[in-house]
Amino acid sequence: MKYILKTIFLSFLIFSLSAKAQDMTAGFSNLEKGELDQAEVFFANILKDYPQNKTARLCYARAIGLNKQAEKALDNFIVLKKEYPGDLEIELNYAEALLWNNKFDEAKIFYTTLVAKNPTNFVAHLGFANTLSNLKEYKEALFHVNKAIELSPGSAGPLVSRKYIRLGYAGQKVNEKNYKEAEAFYDEVLVDFPNDKEALMNKANLYLITKEINKGKAVYNLLGKDNPVLAMNGIALLEHIGGKEKNALKMATESLAKSASITDETLKNQTEERYVQALIWNKKYTEAATKIDELTAANPNKNWVMSLAATLAIYKSNFPESITNYENILKNDSKSFDGNLGIANAYKASGEVSKAYNAALTTLEIFKNQGDAMNFIKKLKEEFTPFIEEKLSYTFDNGNNTAVASRTLISIPLSTKWTVNTTYQHRQTQNTVTNVNAKTNDFIAGIEYKFHPKISYALDLGVSSANSNVTSYTQALIHTYFKIKPLKLQDLEVGYKREIQNFNSDLISKEIAVNNYYLNYNLSTNFNFGWFTQYFYSSQTDENKRNLLFTSFYYNFMAKPVLKGGLNYQYISYKNRVPLDYFSPKKFNAVEIFLEVLKDEQMAEVNSWYYNANLATGYQFIEDDSKQWTYRIQAKVGYKFSDRLIANLYGTRSNIASATAAGFTFNEFGLRIKWNLTGKPIFKLK
């Protein structure tokens, strides 16, 4: 931001010299009016006849300095300063010439002495303030500009300088995330300059960052008195940040209609851009694509249009297409913010972590302390930071079974591809009627390797040690699986898991190991529908076999927070019925409708809550028996204490048939704590 006013010293200089050189009035007038070419010629002609005239030399140097010949002007002032040591007028102009040449450090040293010698000189304090402002030393700059205002209360120049010093200081506070202090500086500017557009625009941007929707709207409404299109564009973005996408589209549509009558081409383009963005936010992808094609035809190879195409591709999970668009943007402008941070997001979405990280670093090299880029890097590092997770639970049912369990997981990413983990699980169960109790202790170690952005493999090996009133044994535990993204918007997991039936004490005593072969498949769409299917084929050590199919068809009603609902269907069949040991029907069907609301912990800000609630009800059909009404309630509420610590309480209540019995009620309550062991990955992202 430019703070140096071209006429800082002009009035002072003309007043000082006019009495000495009345015949130079025309030249002084040229300088005062900013007619620099005429002033340069005028004083050059004077110097032809009077080459040693101090006033003409000084004014000539000012004319050429203000007329884009800063280096030559400084050379002239250096000569004058040597010839007239201690001359205040020359020293003041020499100091200003240092500013013209961006020699701010030298200017600071010189002004320090100059102000010390002339503590009541208005021009010296004002020049020093502008010097310090350019050095981003805003606190001291404010002191000196306030001193200048005190020395010359009626002058407009120092008020303008103070405005830009405060705007710069506020910008610095925003980068430091001291948002309240920044807001105070903007308010102070508006006291001096009511409804100042620059201050209001900066204040509105602050509220975009802090997501203070109502405050932001109030500021844009003030801007809207002179520029309604600009204001509506801003309000549309605020509505998006607030999760009200329909309102955002309505506002963007109105803004687009109003923009037809304006002549500002830049604002017209910004309005077109906001309208397309609003279409994308509302998942109106066909309309957005049509509009982008129109804009591309009218504005070929324009970065802002290619950025819209890249954004649409991201939303539609066409990541290669998005990357291509961002690459084209960077060919046009390697320092484009949208290009650099946009391609970072596209790389991350496509699983290319190292490229995403490097692109974000490039963004920060160009845009120092830029909040979005810093947050992107922070989130990326969190994904690869070692953590420990502790889960404590208590369960009970109407079959007089209780269980207390704990699970400790430590996960340590060694690189963007390799992760190692270890888990310890303890479960203690008891039946209060039969007085049978049992304990299991599981020790598991695992690795995960991501050998392709769309394919990863995991292997967990361990042992389960069980002890009950009647038996004790040790069994192997295995869990191995592939996670694959076969096509866009699709996720597939195929695996094998060997586990021990440990739901209650009786099952633990029977030493039943289960070999599960399974797949999970999820299909998302660009039109809010989704489909999840799970299939298990299980072979047990008691010679029984099981088939389990679960499928869920759902619709996403809202994105922030997530609100979805749908229909679930479950089918179970066992080869052998062993009702005295565990629930094992030859045929079991269950149908339920559900509604879920979710604010994901990954999206939660520090010092904020996250939550999840799932309500379901329906009917189950056990073999040929009459249908039975079922319900399921699951809830979780948690708090993000810091970037490293989160915790949540959870609970479940259900009457759906389980692995042990039908016609029962099951309850579970628990506490989960997750803590990042370090503040960043133990390896260097690159």
Image (tube, rainbow, N blue to C red):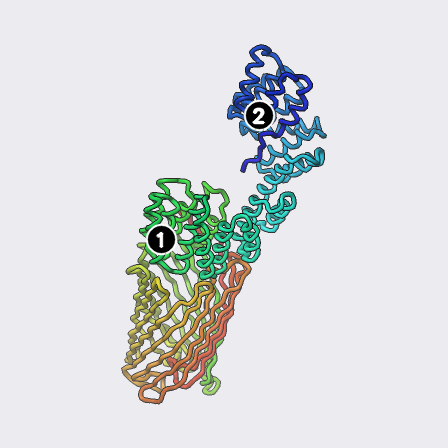
The residue beneath circle 2 is 97
Q: Amino acid at mark 2?
A: Ala
Sequence order check: which comes first, mark 1 or mark 2? 2
On screen, residue 289 above or below 128: below
* Element type where label 2 sits in the image: helix
Between circles 1 and 2, the one closer to the viewer is: 1
Please tell me which residue lies in front, 332 or 41. Answer: 41
Q: Is the residue marked by circle 2 packed among few (<14), some (14-19), or many (20+) residues within 10 Å?
A: many
Farthest residue in the front direction?
Answer: 261
x and y percent of residue 544 in the render? 29, 80
Q: Is the residue marked by circle 1 packed among few (<14), some (14-19), or many (20+) residues within 10 Å?
A: some
The residue beneath circle 1 is 291
Gap in Å between the C-alphas at discs 1 and 2? 51 Å
Picture quadrant of residue 421: bottom left
Please tell me which residue lies in front, 99 or 521. Answer: 99
x and y percent of residue 191 in the render? 65, 46
Please tell me which residue lies in front, 511 or 153. Answer: 153
On screen, residue 170 above or below 275: above
* Element type where label 1 sits in the image: helix
x and y percent of residue 448 in the render? 35, 59
x and y percent of residue 401 in the render? 46, 82
Which residue sits at x=65%, y=22%?
Answer: 89
Picture quadrant of residue 424: bottom left
Q: Is residue 216 left or right of residue 627?
A: right
Q: Which mark is residue 208?
A: none
Q: Is residue 358 visible?
A: no
Which residue sits at x=45%, y=73%?
Answer: 614
> Mark 1 near mark 2, Cβ–Cβ under 8 Å?
no
Q: Is residue 360 left or right of residue 60?
A: left
Q: Amino acid at mark 1?
A: Lys
Picture quadrant of residue 515: bottom left
On screen, residue 557 above or below 235: below
